Amino acid sequence: MATPTIFVTGTDTGVGKTLVARALLLRLRAQGLRAAGFKPVASGARRTPQGLRNEDALALLAASAPGLDYAAVNPYCFEPPIAPHLAAREARQAIRIEALNAAYARLAQAYERVIVEGAGGWRVPLDESLTFAEWVGAHRWPVLLVVGMRLGCLNHALLTAESVLRHTELCGWVANVPPPAPQRLQENIDTLRARLPAPLLGIVPEGSSAEQAAASLTWPESAV
């Protein structure tokens, strides 16, 4: 049987994907499962003696079961905080889908669960023709949508869900509340609960740690 995998996407960049992905990893490990985080492509990194390092990928590495190195979690890392395909072009390095698939396969073989985090939103390009949507759809991974509860979130969430369902399963969504909490928060959550074609799996209060976020989530059935 294939290793249960969830792809974590968001309505935009900076909406809490990494926080939720870390929370999922912590929950899995608390259940005694060997779980690995996977950030296939990251842009926005700092130079270190060990090479480029992205903060989101480092957070996933820290939340994963032992035995991983950085390259296993984040095979493509670029310095400028711009769209990955543009960062790759500047670095004169192609993002090869075959390499992403091989990196995922190694994790899936060694770990019982894999939590994959995208970059930016659902349809961020990986190269000149493919986006995350096509890559995830080819694997048929269930998608967990993180909705940043801020102005514009209703439109962004509904459009993202519509696109996800053209490619694969939407297993649920999480309402992440950024500081400061927006106006009409509960009304917006209620609107999305009524309109999104997947269950609300949790509301992450503003300022939550990964541990607090883990406690606030209902586990997606697709990952059981």
Image: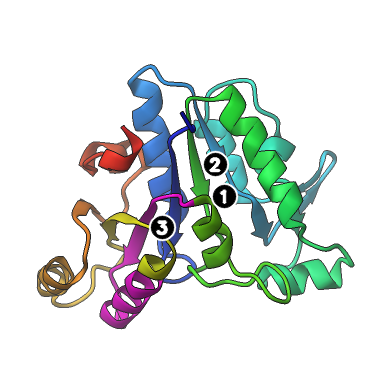
Residue displayed at 69% across by 36% down: 72
Asked if residue 56 lies left or right of residue 96, the reply is left
- Residue 144 image offset from top left, x and y in percent: 36, 54
The kind of residue tagged 3 is Gly
If you read the primary sequence from the N terminus, does the residue marked by circle 1 or circle 3 appear first? 3
Q: Residues within 10 Å of mark 3 (few under 14, many from 20)?
A: many
Tell whether label 2 touches label 1 (CB within 8 Å): yes
The kind of residue tagged 2 is Ala
Numbered mark located on residue 56 in the image: 1
- Residue sticking out furthest to the front: 1
Q: Residues within 10 Å of mark 1 (few under 14, many from 20)?
A: many
Kindly identify which residue carries mark 3.
16
Residue displayed at 44% across by 53% down: 8
Numbered mark located on residue 2 in the image: none
The kind of residue tagged 1 is Asp
Look at the image and tell me in which quarter the C terminus lies: top left
Label 3 – label 2 distance at C-alpha: 12 Å
**Color encoding of the figure:** rainbow
- Residue 92 image offset from top left, x and y in percent: 89, 67
Q: Would you identify the image quadrant in which residue 166 lies?
A: bottom left
22 up-or-down from 167: above or below:
above
Q: Nearer the viewer, residue 183 or 224?
A: 224
- Residue 28 image offset from top left, x and y in percent: 37, 28
Label 1 – label 3 distance at C-alpha: 10 Å
Numbered mark located on residue 59 in the image: 2
Secondary structure beneath label 2: helix
Magenta segment boundaries in residue numbering: 140-163
Q: Is residue 54 magenta?
A: no
